[in-house]
Amino acid sequence: MSTTRPASLPIAPAQPAAAGAARPSREGAASKPSTAFRESTYLKHLFGYEILGKPALRLQRWRDEQAIRAYEPKPTDVLSPPLVCVAQMKELMTRHYLEGRYASGVKKVAWVTSGAPAEILKAFGFFLVYPENHAALCGVRRKTEEIATEAENAGFSRDLCSYARTDLGTVLSGKTPVGRLPRPDLLLCCTNICQTVLYWYRNLADLFGVPLVLIDTPFLYGEAQPHQIEYVKRQIEGIIPVAEKVAGKALDEERFESVLQHARDAADLWLEVLNRSQNRPAPMTAFDGFIHMGPIVDLRGDAVTVEYYRRMLKELDARVAQGVGAVKDERYRVLWDNLPIWYRIGGFSKLLAQHGVNVVVSTYTYAWGELAPLIDPAKPLDSMAKVYLHPILNRSPADKLRVMRRMVKEFGLDGVILHSDRSCKPYSLGQIDERELLARELGLPALLLEADHSDPRAWADEQGNARLEAFVEMMEGRG
Amino acid sequence: MSLPEVLPSRAEVIARVKSQGKRLLAVMPIHYPRALLRAYGFHPIELWGPPDAPVAQGARHFQAYTCDIVVKATSFLLSGGADVAEGILVPHTCDALQGMAAVLHDFVHPRQRVLTLYHPRERREADRLYYVDELARLGRDLEELAGKRPSEGEWTEALATETAATTALAELYRDRPRLALGDREFYTLVRSREYLPSEDFIRIASAVQRGAPRAADGVPILLSGIVPEPMSLFDAIHAAGAAVVADDLACGFRRVYEIPERGSALERLAASILDAPADPTRGTPLAERAEELILRMTSTGARGMLVYGVKFCEPELFDLPRLRHYLGEAGFPMTHIEHELVSTLGQQAVTRIEAFVETLQ
């Protein structure tokens, strides 16, 4: 049978015979680029990213920091000014996507799921693209509807995950708010967050004709069994020969250990950052957490990420010492379960803050910190197998409920918002019972809020806001 | 005698199996090792809904965007429909069934024990080794439930009987053009595997008359999807002037296993499921699935593929655009009809079927 793929995909080519759109084929990745092409891609990378891009972003960061520092709070402000470090976070993430624009032909590129053991690929020097993060960014910039429609026009149902639709929409149309995504040489998919990623990456593998490495993680209905851990370990080991083949070099064990150490240090710091909100008033909101999680997802294993969260922690500590809360008049403290509603983050933050509500903690942001103690750079593969088998999404809802109960106690919470996310069924199924148990056992107001993490078509402002306000009234009613 | 007269009802089978001292296990779709269950003395009764179950009880636990099979099966269980069963086996077919198993296990706490089975989504050495261990784990759960471990003889009998039943099913598909059965009857017989003891299935399937091969009674098509509910779907296809000559149904051809002759019992069972026909829920790569489908369509003379998919079924929905592309290239049109699990076929679906068949004529 024919295995012809679409004539072209508007994603930056890895090694095409000529400049322009990629011609995806199974053989495509193996074809050798011409010397002239290689030189031109290196030059573009040098000028676009190293010489012009990076300094421009540094300058922008300096300006943003100055603007935040110079901000004169108004009496009507319900939120404190943003953390100054947000400017650096913006620089890091923009730089990452900018590098992506020029990465093809300069570095090997891998597209990976957010919960994948990407440290190995990082040690090989792959440039990593996280399509979920890119889709979240499209959500924040309100581009999801336009881009996802491209996938829907190609036949992908609107009932499918909006991250997947956004990513496939970008692949099929080239539309992205970051300029351009580099074409993958390798795909790494780990099912520890959902089975959706498996079907999604099977599509990517088919469209791009590149190798897909699957890390299949049995769902944990209870304690992890030895055969499940062994299974994940064997698969993680299996990444190495494929990556070696694609990268054309052997794994540098020393670098691998250092990447793992950075990943662990960053995860430790991230956990500390999140736990600072146990203070009253909390120095940040969970909505800030959603925004600041970019580096721990996309740049896990980099030294700069460790440095960044160290700085963030310092700034939070200063706020705690001065008694500065992210919400100026913090009266109620709330938990957020599930992914954020990316296109409404700012709106929710303000709306809730007007009522003195601070969403101080979320189960979602914790996913990148809670497993930090399991990372052992001295036993890389064994510890990675355990870490990547245990994310909150790969554990039973009863386990998530235990986490939420603990958070209620540790963060002194007054209510819980459970985002029932159409696009994330593994996270959402179980929430109806969780809500009921939290309300019954702990006597807390608990709201099940129907939406979608990225697609605004699943959200109605009027009804949604009314439900949030009714939830606040319930907390106010309790005094 | 016609097929409906020969086939006992679910209720009759349940009563008979219980009177024989066997234990019943309610089983959710799609794949599970029947011989393993049999060796431990369990008889599976599968739950693909059922379509006429009221949704209220299931809807108290699941959001409106959850697949009907999960919601209705939960309703059925909670209304006491499967009280005769001693356990509920929920294989890890998809995120929705994962959610169902977890909600039952963690929150609903039905009287019956909830058993799970995680299928690997690849066919590498690591997957095979894992799957054997995972089947052994399921075996330990069954042992706790049954209070006994199967003897060598019970294992041998279970494997022999289930291999024979699997062969009987494969022969039904192979002999299909020669069978004196219409589409609805054929799939009624195939689906009787969902509750019929294997020895009964073997007997009835072998007794179906084989004549000379005959041409399809209408425009030949391949039917894909999870489950053809309501079964009047086949009447609508026939009325539109088409005939189902092959399928890619989760409750049909995707479960035509081949149990290898070599290896330990668990290795053989693991291989039979891992090497089963293409299935997105087991992670079959798209091109491979398309290739299998095109081969099946070519060999049976099917002119197009009708996908009759349950709403919100992610594994199916994700595959459709690329399957449409591959099948289109090979000259096979495809159409997709989404349905909820109900006992009457909607007029909209009938119209879509008619329109599709017209394009193939």
Image: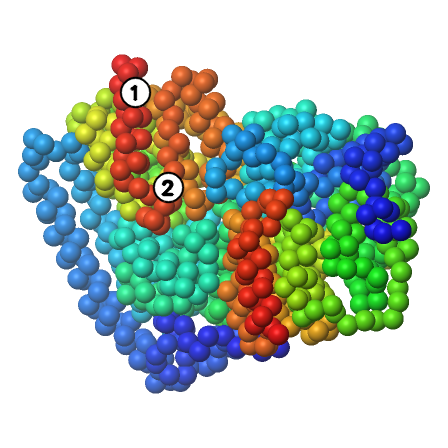
Mark toward the start of the polypeptide (1 vs 2): 2
The quarter of the picture where the N terminus of chain A appears is bottom right
Q: Is residue A449 left or right of residue B351?
A: left
Q: Residue at x 72, y 46 (%)?
A: B32
The one of A328 and B301 positioned closer to us in this rendering? B301
Residue A67 position within the rendered picture, expressed as x and y whole percent measured from the top left: 10, 47
Q: Chain of mark 2?
A: A
Discs 1, 2 touching: Cβ within 8 Å: no
Name the front one of labels 1 and 2: 2
| Residue on which disc 1 sits | A475
Residue A182 position within the rendered picture, expressed as x and y whole percent measured from the top left: 37, 67
Q: Residue at x 12, y 52 (%)?
A: A63
Q: Is residue A350 left or right of residue B67?
A: left
Q: Is residue A358 above or below residue A66?
A: above
> Could you say whether the residue bearing mark 1 is in a helix, strand or loop?
helix
Q: Residue at x 89, y 51 (%)?
A: B1
Q: Is residue B295 above or below residue B205?
A: below
| Residue on which disc 2 sits | A451
Q: Residue at x 70, y 65 (%)?
A: B243
The quarter of the picture where the C terminus of chain A appears is top left
View extreme (right): residue? B153
Q: CA distance from mark 1 to mark 2?
A: 22 Å
**Kind of residue at badge 2:** Ala
